[in-house]
Image (tube, grey):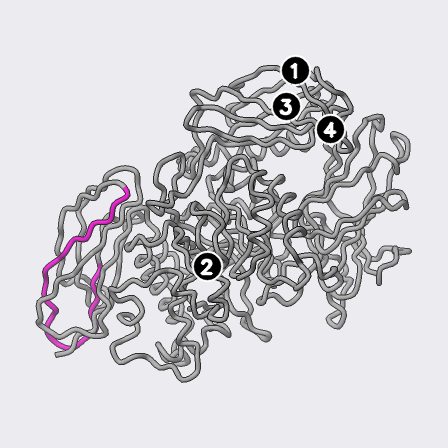
Amino acid sequence: MRHFYHINLLMYCLGILLTACGTQADKRQVVNLNGIWEIEKTDGELPSHFSATVQVPGLVDLATPAIDTLQAMYQDGWYWHKSSFELKETDFEKIELKIHKAKYHTKVYVNGQYAGENLYCFTPSYFDLKPYLNPAGQPNELLIGVGCKDQLPDTIPDGHDYEKLKYIPGIYDKVEIILANRPYIRNIQCVPDVINGRLRVVAELETEQAGGIPLEYEVTEVISREAFRKGSLAVDGTPVPEEGIVKVDFEIDMEGSNLWSPESPFLYELLVKTEGDDKRTRFGMRSFRIDPERKIALLNEKPYYIKGTNVCIFRFFEDPQRGSLPWDAEWPIQLHQQFKRMNWHMMRYCIGFPPERWYEICDSLGFMLQDEYPIWYLKEKVKSPQIAEEYKRWMRERWNHPSVVIWDAQNELVTEETGKAIRQVRELDLSDRPWENGWSRPERATDPSESHPYLFIKYMEEGVQEPPEGYKKELFGHAIRPMNDANQRYFEVHKDEKGSFDNPSLINEYGWIWLNRDGSTTTLTDRVYDVLWDGKSLTPEQRIEIYSRHLAMLTEYWRAHRQAFGILHFCGLGYSRPEEPRGQTSDHWIDLVNLRYQPSFYKYVRSSFAPVGLMIDLWEKSYKAGTKLSVPVYVINDLDRPFAQEVRLEWLKEGGAIQTLALPVEVAPYEVKIISFDTSVPNGNGDFQLRAVYGTGEDEVFSLRDIPVKE
């Protein structure tokens, strides 16, 4: 499988190069404008000079020399990015600038002439350049201005996040010029039908021509570059009045195609040609849906239990070590490879969209995505028509990515506006992906319910002390609370609006025991560690050990009881802010540049996410020496094949095994089996451990429990 990834990544990089450069056969030309631009900040007027440079894509804090002061950082100003370009030909009917993503509020001038603006911050901007261009072979000046968050109208979602401070503006995704003739291919939507081996293609053609438009298509395997299917048809349609758009709807026989999955991320490329244009898009033969009766996810019509993490890219944009890492050629690939090493195959891109290249990496490496629109707070005047328009632009940009399996409308809000917006745009996605709607009511029975069972949050409150029977039994126990009850404390005031529902649960946050990368507590966990573990007396390494072990126990617990079809740890990439003003959450890196995990995190949490996991179901605060003990061990098989191995139960003292028991175990696909080891608690006072384990070396999977023994 590792060999497959390397080949796929090599072909991915080659494909990006070919797309950027084009080929002689391509009718469409794409000019890449990424690179070093000049930059200047003003109060809004066009700049008279430029005093610094900055990389595009990037953020304005990368300017050299810096153009902000601490007193006027990312407030009340406009950041003007200047570059120049030449076009060898200008007689194309369409010459369009595409800014893939920029924030906040974008204005464009070409050769000193105003070419347009876009208020939206998280979706692409398109500008017609043709009226403003100099003749072919002469230089053109391009000026792109981006504003600050606090200048946006109060009708526009601004990506507010309670943990962020700076809201750094910038052109944070690629910039390119598209040159083509009509019929111009505005958009392509690929709709895989894995059951019948068909691909539905819906293409939008910008044309003034009515009927009789010849069209050709070709499907190619991305890795081998071998042609898989090709054909032609004549489009019989009339342009939509005023829009000049003809929709083409046809099917391609994909019998014998390879399915896309995290285990085998097989990609195809579709090329569609008209007389004046051609457009390429990648897709995977993949289906994804949620079964409301069994409350499980189905990938390619087979059960699939989801395990993964979160990436908060906009928070990472404010991390002091971020630099240009998000736009580096290798670092994002290595990041996702490290996520794979954790036995993760899905991520929520949480409260923020990374550059488009990150989605391409997920397609190629085999990561499923819950793609969350950056809404965690809605200003009073942000209403569903505006939200729906932004959702529409977002969906059109993403719907061919096989990695994107869930649209996520927002995070943790109880509001009617996002639900209304979902209803306005849902039918546009012909693949009918599920929609997640934060803590608001799901729109359909096939939509997931977002669950954030933060069991440790109660210890953050003043006056709460550790219960006499011990926090583990009180928190975990044997009576499993419904997932949504764990969220109830957050929105007691919204009971009437929220109502009750029983949709399949997706746990995409849990824990509330965060630590900064240096092992210090955050503002949300100071008291948690003090109450439960006498946190101030611990070393950073001891706190990280506690954090990692309890994350592992929580992961095992949610997996073992199968009340959620997916479990996403929070979070794989965020920020670390141990200094004032201190942060609230963080991730697990000890070396961000070289992507090295905290050793304890990798040791314990990786095992808890293994495809076949284990959980020792013991939670008592102490155990009496010499008593008989029946040790239940859950064996959790998430695979589509039986598991048959020997599971060992080890008594440990000071890290060494003093007794080992073993049982052969067989577990059917997708099942959880409870086995029981009969043993006795060792004599004498002391701290012992029980470890259930199978496998050896790097493939070892285990569950660990402390067993304090008292005579």
Instruction: Kindly check if marks 3 and 4 are in contact, taking CB atoms under 8 A apart as contact.
Output: no
Which residues lie in the magenta part?
Answer: 670-691
Instruction: Kindly check if marks 3 and 2 are in contact, taking CB atoms under 8 A apart as contact.
Output: no
Q: Sequence order check: which comes first, mark 3 or mark 1?
A: 1
Secondary element at tag 2: strand
Q: Is residue 266 left or right of residue 611?
A: right
Q: Is residue 452 left or right of residue 640?
A: right
Residue behind mark 3: 272
Residue behind mark 2: 570
Three-letter residue code for mark 4: Glu
> Which mark is in front, 3 or 2?
3
Q: Nearer the viewer, residue 659 or 701?
A: 701
> Which mark is in front, 3 or 1?
1
Going 87% across and 46% down the picture, which residue do you hit?
A: 114
Give residue 354's position: percent from left, percent from top.
59, 49
Q: Sequence order check: which comes first, mark 3 or mark 2?
A: 3
Q: Which mark is residue 206?
A: 4
Q: CA distance from mark 2 to mark 4?
A: 43 Å
Residue behind mark 1: 234
Three-letter residue code for mark 3: Val
